[in-house]
Amino acid sequence: MSIRIHKVAGSITAFALLVSTTICLGAPSPDTDLAKFQRYFSERFPAVPFDDFANGSYALDPVLRENWEAIEEFPPYETAIEEGREMWETPFRNGKSYADCFGGEHAIANRYPHWDADRRMVVTLPMALNECRTANGEEPLPYKKGKLMSVLAFVTFESRGQKTAVDVPAEDDDALAAYEKGKAFFYTRRGQLNLSCAHCHVAYPGQLLRSETLSPALGHTTHWPVYRSKWGEMGSLHRRFAGCNEQVRAKAFDAQGEEYRDLEYFLTYMNNGLPLNGPASRK
């Protein structure tokens, strides 16, 4: 990271604290959090239609959007979708397939993440796909990149247009605790740069950090997995979480560990109502 991030952090510290306090601290319920969170971004960017927040920073900058739309004419994730389709349709060694784990459906992305009341934990789509594999005698696949991203690309492509619809059961104290842990993670400073997720993505979206236009937190979970030019390949949401932690010089957590699953639970809940539009391409 360059020294400039210190200047950015210094200029937004007070504003970030104000915003995070306004949105979350003292909020009596996830529903209240959601209303305040989405209202904040709608008022901050009144020219952006609600559904367009699913496009990240490309919803904010017309030049970035034009360049991105040109890339989307020949999207770099097409081969991943086709590989994922083939993997979905190819039986496991026991003769069963992914479809057998999900009631014969493949457009299932809007079901995740969800609270598993039996196991008392948040379950994400990548986790569910790997659990399907192991239940059928197959080895689990890496969570940050590789062939699991192709299966995810196929499933999310088939799920495009579904509305984000995460439920936090109000009567389940453990589900509420997982949500609160994810919320706390989002607003907690970490690393040598002493920054939280909210510093960049609540207080400063649309502004430049070095050469990058910071994206709004509203919409962060709608479009994964992503082909990033920086990576030169498909990657997962938790890979991006880890990269952000490392950029503020904090130690990253394990992909699909409790910390990132709870963070995904909170962020996806904040995106309720937005359309799923993955997979996607990003810088």
Image (cartoon, rainbow, N blue to C red):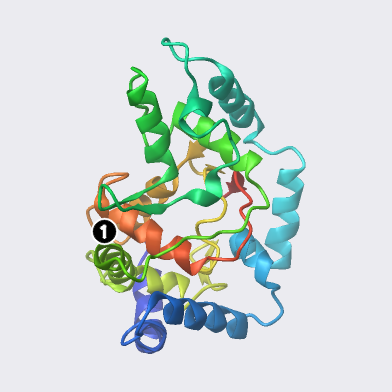
Amino acid type of the residue that numbered disc 1 sits on in the rendered structure: Arg
- Say above or below: 261 vs 139: below
Q: Position of residue 233 (x, y in %)?
A: 52, 35
Side of 264 relative to 86 (left or right): left
Rate crowding at label 1 as few (under 14), some (14 to 19) or many (20 or more) other CA atoms within 10 Å.
Answer: some
Q: Which residue is mark 1?
A: 249
Seen at 49% across and 26% down, the residue is 100
Q: Position of residue 248 (x, y in %)?
A: 30, 62
Residue 15 vertical placement versus 277 (above, below): below
Q: Nearer the viewer, residue 210 or 64?
A: 64
Circle count:
1
* Residue 62: x %, y % from top left: 73, 66
112 relative to 174 in the view: left or right = right
Q: Is residue 246 visible?
A: no
| 91 is higher (above) or lower (below) than 117 | above
Residue at horizontal 37 percent and vertical 36 percent from the top:
143
- Kindly identify the residue that appears in the image at 34 percent across and 73 percent down: 6
For numbered disc 1, what is the local secondary structure?
Answer: loop
Please indicate, yes or no, whether residue 62 appears anywhere in the rendered image: yes
For the N terminus, give its image quadrant.
bottom left
| Left or right: 46, with 130 as reference point | right
Residue 194: quarter of image: bottom left
Residue at (56, 27) in percent of width and height: 84
Q: Position of residue 52 (x, y in %)?
A: 68, 65
The one nearer the camera, 238 or 167, is 167
For this rendering, which residue is in front, 44 or 111? 111
